[in-house]
Amino acid sequence: MAGLKTLLGLFPKTAAFEKNRKQLADEYNALIEYDSSDDLARFKELELYIQSDEFKTLRNELLTLRYNNSEEYKKEIDFKKLSSDKEIKLFLKTQSSAALKLYNEVSKSDKLARYNELDALIKTPAFSEVKNFYAQSGKKRFELSDLGKTLAEYHAKSKSESIRAYQKFTSDKLFKDYNTVRGSDKLALYEELKKYINSSAFFEQKANMGKSDFKASDAGKKLHEYKLLSKSKEIKNYLKHATSPFLNAYNKLSESGEYQLFLDLQSKINSSSFKQERQAIERKTFKDTDEYKLETEYKMLSSDAEIKKYFAFRESKEFANYKSIKDSAKLEKYLSLKEYLSGSTFAEKKKYLTMAPKTRWKQSEPFARQLEFEKLKDSEKIKWYFKTRNHKKFEWLRTWELTFEDEFEAGKLDTNKWITRYYWGNELLNESYSLADEKHCITDGNNLSFKGGILQITTRKEKCEGKIWNPEIGFAPHEFNYTSGLINTGGSFRQEHGLFEAKIKIARNPHVQNAFWMVGNTMEPHINVINAQNKCMFNTITSDSPENKKTYRRGKLASDYFIYSVEWTANEIIWRVNGLEMHRTNLNVPKGEMFINISAGLYTEIESGLPATMDIDWVRCYQRRS
């Protein structure tokens, strides 16, 4: 059928073909865009969720959920049990009682603090000692007092042997002279003379002198003086008293000052103040003490109604239970449950758990997600997406990926994509040249122009000097009668295999060649996507095999824009015009990368029909997607 349509020239209208492809591309792009949309992502997420075990499990749980099997029910039962617990009930009763309130108030009061202070004081050994002390007779208290101990000390000293000996020594009538002479110069002289009279020197001197001489001598005078002193009453009494048996006691007490202490003690004992203090001690009772005042204050506080209630409550079973339960885990659990059960969270959960299973399910988040899924599933966009996404009409778009394009919308040639010479002229000469059989000079872009987003290559009759390539002599100057132009992607884009197409309107003049072709670094092989001369050719050219081509009349294709394309694989080449297959071959399929060429020119001399213009709307290249 395709061959018959080709023969009859039943090509799809270019505008309709382009419009259909654009609509298809727009729809495909819309599919691709929607493929990454939040709506579709949400739909897929919900679909996975609705199909998941998690959803089914949650649905089953929500439909089979019962209050009697819930944690809330268990907590409610636990609270009821704790509310009936005797210890908890007694604790709560005590907690709100006047007795506990009073206990807490008294606990912080100065009154209780004073009571405790006095209680501690009265129980001390020191307080008991004072009380016991005053429980004795006045005489006994005096004896135990410091004053009594002083008197006892005096009596003891009075009876001591040393004191008695001292007193006897000093009370003797001879003591007066003893005390007068002791330490006197008179006694010192007496003892000095006595020592001298008894010395050997004195006896020797006395023996060597006559009586009268001795008496007049110093020694005789000293003897006389000694005899006078020896007869002195004071010296005689002194010497007599110095032999008393009480002398040692007297000397010892006099030197130590002990007897003076005894006298001081005696003076104190005999003083009026001592007697007054003694009377005060013997007359003073416990009621006269500070301790009695403290005891009286203590007794008053002990009789205080609040203090008595305080201690009565402190010893009660209610208070013992209160202390036991106050910081217990049982009370903590009771209070925690009470707070939870009286809160809105529990009320809401209980209401939720006691509602009808289907009602609960319809209020659930999984059900809401199910409704959202069903709504999305029923939406026109989702229906369109799943109905359209795998449609075979998108096979072309799914197959091909754009690798090169030029829409010529800029109004000037994009020199990053195109060069305006043969590739090797650009590489070797840095200027343009023509082939030996070409009648036209390929100008360096002078025959290119733009009109409304259309690139025009115009072939003109005009003189021009340029270069020509002759295989026998190489590059040589040449004068041409015609000019034309070409563009190629030899410096920017090359590709092996793929889809290569362009929207072109060829010139009507059958003598002017218009060509859309592909070539590598050598002129052969190359692929003519279309080569329009007298006829339009769709062919490949190789040096080692016969030309493989399909021809078609030029007049039909010169009437309008057509989209010319080549699909080139490793094993086959297919030519199409507006999507209609023109030719197919699997013979001598070229290998290696090729670049695009679009050219116009003359191979015969002509006199009319010029200028002739070839119009190119766009060029696009694709490769198969991975």
Image (tube, rainbow, N blue to C red):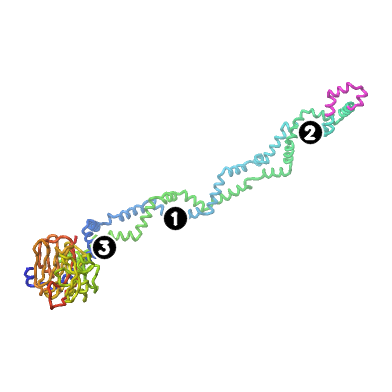
Viewer-nearest residue: 588 or 605? 605
Q: Few, some or many C-alpha atoms within 10 Å of disc 3 (few <14, some 14-19, many ≥20)? A: few
Q: In this orientation, which residue lies closer to the viewer: 609 or 194? A: 609
Q: Tag 2 or tag 1, which sits nearer the N-term?
A: 1
The residue at 73%/44% (across/down) is 272
The picture places residue 188, in percent across and down from the top left corner, at 83, 31
Alpha-carbon span between mark 3 and mark 2: 128 Å
Q: Nearer the viewer, mark 1 or mark 3?
A: 3
Place residue 140 in its image quadrant.
Answer: top right
Image quarter (top left, top right, bottom left or bottom right) of the C terminus: bottom left
Q: In front here: 544 or 573?
A: 544
Which residue is labeled 2 in the image? Answer: 170
* Label located before the other in sequence (3 or 2): 2
Give the amino acid type for the residue marked by disc 1 in the picture. Answer: Ser
Residue at the spot x=92%, y=22% of the render? 211
> Which mark sits nearer the N-terminus, 1 or 3?
1
Which residue was labeled with disc 3?
363
Predominant SS of the magenta segment: helix
CA gap, disc 1 and disc 3 = 48 Å
Q: Is label 2 in a helix, a strand or a loop? A: helix
Which residues are the magenta region? Answer: 191-218
Q: Quadrant of residue 68?
A: bottom left
Q: Is residue 308 left or right of residue 508?
A: right
Identity of the residue drawn at 54% across and 53% down: 111
Quarter containing the N terminus: bottom left
- Residue 468: percent from left, percent from top: 18, 69
In this figure, which residue is indicated by the disc labeled 1?
Answer: 97
* Amino acid type, label 2: Thr
Within 10 Å of disc 2 (Cα), the crowding (few <14, some 14-19, many 20+) is some
Determine whether, in the image, residue 174 is placed left or right of residue 432. right
Image position of 83 with respect to 158: above or below? below
Of residues 379 and 229, which is closer to you in this image?
A: 379
